[in-house]
Image: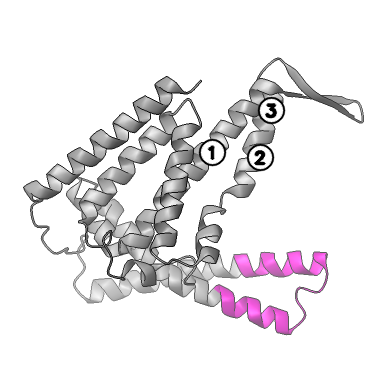
Amino acid sequence: MVDFFPDTFSARDNCLSSIDARVKLLLAMVLLVLVVASKQPVFPLAVLSTSLCALFALRVPWRVVLLRVAAPFSMVLVLIALQSVLRGSTPLWIFHFASWKIVLTKEGLQIGLLSGIRVFGSMSVVVLLGMITPTHHIFRAMLWMGTPQGWVEIAVLMYRYMFTVFDFAMDMTAAQRMRLGYEGVLRGMGSMQTMIGTVILRSMDQAFKTHEAMALRGYRGAIPFAPIPPISPRQIGVILCGVLFALGCWFAFERTCF
């Protein structure tokens, strides 16, 4: 649970956790846009390496960091494979499967690798933001940025009850293992299907119970949030400096790298 919900790390006192959540969220959004817009791999790699160095400097266990950053690894592999087959014209590798002829192209492989690097760079920014900012501060920063309150309420409730759903899934999986539910591939797949279906039904039942409990406590369509103080001129200066620095690095890498 700690690996997926790292509030333990975000509650630590350090030079990054003391920065206002609105500043960190805005800078993270700018970095995500720049990483996605990069035409060269240097800037996404620089963002990835900087984020990893920051996480290790904050003494986040390397196992947790690798687990979070490597989460989209399978998706990246599929993306690279599809781009290598569907894009480009220069053959790099040709192999035959039954009556099919599959051609991997050089241009497609380059595009796929660039897309994969973008994914890892973006993921590292999100992981770093989560490790240095408590979740409820991120929700308040989203409200300050003008995110519809209904969306924030849904995010708050989802984050709150994901712990309950995961606890139930872990308990059910442990009970299935005690009954040899994962002995063999076919039996394991059947046990997993049963567990997933039961968890979905349990989450729907929990949603009805939560709504009834909220209605009994005076819920009338909106969750009250504490007032958000105005952002200070110093924090605005930090945002401007961070955005200008990120844009300068992006333009420098994009113009000098070929």
Q: Is residue 153 above or below residue 112?
A: below
What's under tag 3, amino acid-wise?
Ser
Front in this rendered view, residue 258 or 116: 258
Q: Residue furthest top?
A: 89
Residue 84: which numbered mark, if any?
3
Q: CA distance from mark 3 to mark 1?
A: 15 Å
The residues bearing labels 2 and 1 have C-alpha atoms spaced at a distance of 13 Å
Circles 2, 1 touching at the beta carbon (< 8 Å): no
Residue sticking out furthest to the right? 98
Range of the magenta residues?
A: 169-196
Residue drawn at 42 percent across, 50 percent down: 51
Question: Of label 2 and label 1, which has the lower sequence position?
Answer: 2
Secondary structure of the residue carrying numbered label 1: helix
In the drawing, does residue 181 fall left or right of residue 153? right
Q: Amino acid at mark 2?
A: Val
139 or 73, which is in the foreground? 73
> Would you identify the image quadrant in which residue 136 lies?
bottom left
Q: Label 1, on which residue?
A: 117
Q: Are marks 3 and 1 in contact (CB under 8 Å)?
A: no
Circle 2 sits on which residue? 78
What secondary structure characterizes most of the magenta part? helix
23 in magenta? no
Q: Residue at 51% of width from left, 76% of height from top?
A: 167
The image shows residue 75, relative to residue 208, as above or below, that is above
